[in-house]
Image (cartoon, rainbow, N blue to C red):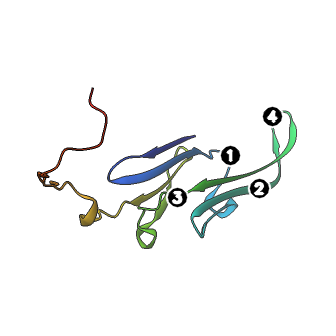
Amino acid sequence: MEVRSDRDKFVIFLDVKHFSPEDLTVKVLDDFVEIHGKHNERQDDHGYISREFHRRYRLPTAVDQSALSCSLSADGMLTFSGPKIVDPSHSERTIPVSREEKPSSAPSS
């Protein structure tokens, strides 16, 4: 399991090799993504086994929830991702420095 959040996107990688797409549910609830996997009892080399997991992750506020995607690779890696919205009001800007006529009351170092 790995979660990445950089400037451009948010990504969750989750190894779900024991589950098929029909066994998985991925949903967004408010500011969280919930990933649930469950399969019925199956026979393996040692007898019978059933598996279930539930993971919940908080989505960053800058993620575009209308553009979320989820895919399952052939080797069982689930990738959930969403682009981040670039807010122009939070980009770099210069703050002008003004000069005051009276001395500051801040301590000098």
Q: Which of marks 2 and 1 is nearer the N terminus?
A: 1
Q: Where does label 1 land, which residue?
A: 18
Callout 2 touching callout 1 (CB < 8 Å): yes
Residue 55 place in picture, x, y as percent: 67, 52
Q: How far apart are marks 1 and 3 (CA)?
A: 25 Å
Marked residue nearer the N-terminal end (1 or 4): 1
Mark 3 residue type: Leu
* Earlier residue among tags 1 and 3: 1
Of badges 1 and 3, the one in the foreground is 3
Given the image, on which type of amino acid does mark 2 rest? His
What residue did someone put label 2 on? 39
Verify CB contact (< 8 Å) between mark 4 and mark 3.
no
Residue beneath the point at 32% across and 53% down: 8
Q: Residue at x 48, y 57 (%)?
A: 60
Q: How far apart are marks 3 and 2 (CA)?
A: 26 Å
For label 4, the SS is loop
Bin the neighbour count of mark 1 within 10 Å (Cα to Cα): few under 14, some 14-19, many 20 and up: some
Q: Kindly identify which numbered label has been placed on residue 45.
A: 4
Q: In which quarter of the image is residue 86?
A: bottom left
Q: Which of marks 4 and 2 is nearer the N terminus?
A: 2
Check if mark 4's residue and mark 2's residue have beta carbons within 8 Å: no
Q: Which of marks 4 and 3 is nearer the N terminus?
A: 4
Percent position (x, y) of residue 14? Answer: 57, 45
Across and down, in percent, residue 83 comes to 37, 60
Mark 3 = which residue? 59
